[in-house]
Image (cartoon, grey):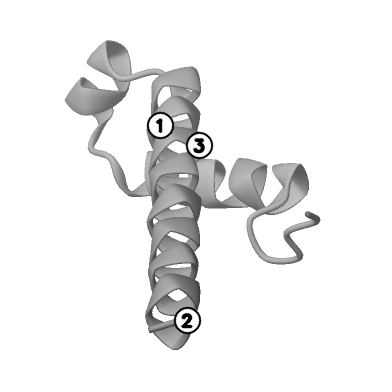
Amino acid sequence: MEDKYLNEENIKRITEIVYGFLPAPARILIKQEHIETVIMNAKEQFVAFLRSGMEEDQENEGV
Protein backbone atom coordinates (compact mmCIF):
# COMPACT_ATOMS: atom_id res chain seq x y z
CA MET A 1 0.00 0.00 0.00
CA GLU A 2 1.62 3.24 -1.14
CA ASP A 3 1.27 6.21 1.14
CA LYS A 4 1.21 9.44 -0.84
CA TYR A 5 1.47 11.69 2.23
CA LEU A 6 3.86 9.93 4.58
CA ASN A 7 6.29 8.60 2.04
CA GLU A 8 10.05 8.66 2.65
CA GLU A 9 10.58 12.05 1.00
CA ASN A 10 7.87 13.77 3.03
CA ILE A 11 9.06 12.20 6.26
CA LYS A 12 12.53 13.64 5.58
CA ARG A 13 10.96 17.09 5.01
CA ILE A 14 8.89 16.87 8.20
CA THR A 15 12.00 15.80 10.11
CA GLU A 16 13.96 18.79 8.83
CA ILE A 17 11.14 21.19 9.74
CA VAL A 18 10.76 19.78 13.25
CA TYR A 19 14.54 19.81 13.75
CA GLY A 20 14.63 23.43 12.59
CA PHE A 21 12.19 24.44 15.34
CA LEU A 22 14.34 22.94 18.08
CA PRO A 23 16.43 25.39 20.09
CA ALA A 24 20.21 24.99 19.71
CA PRO A 25 20.74 23.16 23.05
CA ALA A 26 18.11 20.57 22.10
CA ARG A 27 19.80 19.99 18.74
CA ILE A 28 22.89 18.82 20.61
CA LEU A 29 20.85 16.13 22.38
CA ILE A 30 18.30 15.24 19.69
CA LYS A 31 19.51 14.09 16.30
CA GLN A 32 17.45 14.21 13.11
CA GLU A 33 17.48 10.40 12.98
CA HIS A 34 15.68 10.29 16.34
CA ILE A 35 12.91 12.55 15.06
CA GLU A 36 12.59 10.48 11.89
CA THR A 37 12.31 7.29 13.97
CA VAL A 38 9.51 8.81 16.05
CA ILE A 39 7.61 9.85 12.90
CA MET A 40 8.02 6.38 11.34
CA ASN A 41 6.83 4.66 14.53
CA ALA A 42 3.82 6.96 14.76
CA LYS A 43 2.99 6.23 11.11
CA GLU A 44 3.17 2.47 11.69
CA GLN A 45 0.96 2.71 14.78
CA PHE A 46 -1.56 4.89 12.97
CA VAL A 47 -1.74 2.51 10.00
CA ALA A 48 -2.25 -0.42 12.41
CA PHE A 49 -5.00 1.55 14.16
CA LEU A 50 -6.77 2.24 10.85
CA ARG A 51 -6.49 -1.39 9.77
CA SER A 52 -7.94 -2.63 13.06
CA GLY A 53 -10.86 -0.22 12.64
CA MET A 54 -11.45 -1.47 9.10
CA GLU A 55 -11.39 -5.08 10.29
CA GLU A 56 -13.83 -4.24 13.07
CA ASP A 57 -16.18 -2.56 10.58
CA GLN A 58 -16.07 -5.62 8.34
CA GLU A 59 -16.91 -7.87 11.29
CA ASN A 60 -19.82 -5.63 12.28
CA GLU A 61 -21.21 -5.67 8.74
CA GLY A 62 -21.48 -9.45 8.92
CA VAL A 63 -23.63 -9.28 12.08
Quadrant assignment for the C terminus = bottom left
Mark linked to residue 17: none
Closer-to-camera residue (55/30): 55
Give the residue at mark 1.
35
Q: Quadrant of residue 50?
A: bottom left
Residue 24's x, y, as percent? 26, 29
**Residue 48: percent from the left, percent from the top?**
45, 49
Q: Quadrant of residue 27?
A: top left
> Relative to residue 10, is residue 45 drawn left or right?
left
Q: Earlier in the sequence, mark 2 or mark 1?
A: 1
Look at 38% across and 56% down and name the residue there.
49
Q: Is residue 35 left or right of residue 36?
A: left
In the picture shown, does residue 61 fall above or below 17? below
Secondary structure state at the residue bearing disc 1? helix
Quarter of the figure that contains the N terminus: bottom right
Earlier-in-chain disc, 2 versus 3: 3
Which residue ends up furthest to the front in the rendered image?
63
Q: Nearer the viewer, mark 2 or mark 3?
A: 2
Of residue 63 and residue 12, the one placed in the foreground of this image is: 63
- How much space separates mark 2 and mark 1, taking CA atoms? 41 Å
Q: What residue is disc 3 on?
A: 40
